[in-house]
Image (tube, rainbow, N blue to C red):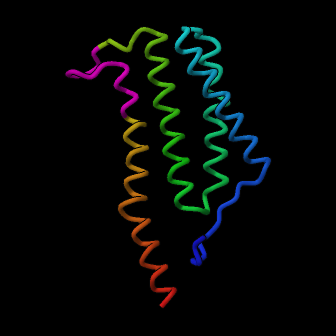
């Protein structure tokens, strides 16, 4: 057991239940995508994305949690765009140069990577420095 005091992060039970339901909705959405159940897949975007936004909002005071939850939110948006492009058959439609309809999903995927990149390259190193200064 370590003698160093690490900050603890605990999730209230009601938040954990919401996160667990989020996973259920996400799985139903992806199963619907796989089975080409358009109506259910499209309907599941709403609760999946809504819960991701609520989780992001509730963790906004913790930079690490917010960054990761925003990345998940962008992942869900990208995933939904990709699903929609396949459902409505514009996934192979050339939009520009070599980019097709499904490549529209790259936009939110890149936003998610950008959020995490900003956190790991800018915010986290700054947190470490402020922790070192605080302990001196």
* Rendering coords of residue 81 (x, y %): 47, 24
135 with respect to 37 (left or right): left
Furthest residue to the bottom? 136
* Rendering coords of residue 34 (x, y %): 52, 13
* Rendering coords of residue 112 (x, y %): 43, 44
Quarter where residue 8 is shown: bottom right
Quarter where residue 54 is shown: top right
Quarter where residue 60 is shown: bottom right
Look at 55% across and 47% down and name the residue there: 69
Q: Is residue 29 above or below residue 56?
A: above
Residue numbers of the magenta segment = 94-106
Q: Is residue 4 above or below residue 135?
A: above
* Rendering coords of residue 35 (x, y %): 55, 9
Q: In the rendered structure, does residue 125 fall within the stretch colored magenta?
A: no
Identify the image quadrant of the N terminus: bottom right
Look at 39% across and 69% down and name the residue there: 125
Look at 67% across and 53% down and name the residue there: 58
Residue nearest the viewer, comparing 5 with 52: 5
Furthest residue to the right? 14
Q: How many marks?
A: 0
Q: In the rendered structure, does residue 99 fall within the stretch colored magenta?
A: yes
Q: Is residue 1 above or below residue 27?
A: below
110 with respect to 84 (left or right): left
Residue nearest the viewer, comparing 119 with 81: 119
Furthest residue to the left? 97
Look at 46% across and 86% down and name the residue there: 133
């Amino acid at each position: 057991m370590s003698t160093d005091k690490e900050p603890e992060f605990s999730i209230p039970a009601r938040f954990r239940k919401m996160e667990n339901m989020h996973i259920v909705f996400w799985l139903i959405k992806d199963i619907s995508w796989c089975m080409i159940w358009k109506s259910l897949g499209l309907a599941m975007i709403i609760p999946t994305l809504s819960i991701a936004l609520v989780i992001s909002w509730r963790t906004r005071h913790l930079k690490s949690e917010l960054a990761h939850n925003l990345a998940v939110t962008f992942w869900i948006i990208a995933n939904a765009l990709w699903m929609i492009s396949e459902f409505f058959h514009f996934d192979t439609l050339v939009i520009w140069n070599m980019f097709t309809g499904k490549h529209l999903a790259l936009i939110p995927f890149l936003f998610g990577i950008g959020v995490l990149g900003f956190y790991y390259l800018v915010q986290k190193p700054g947190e470490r420095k402020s922790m070192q200064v605080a302990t001196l």
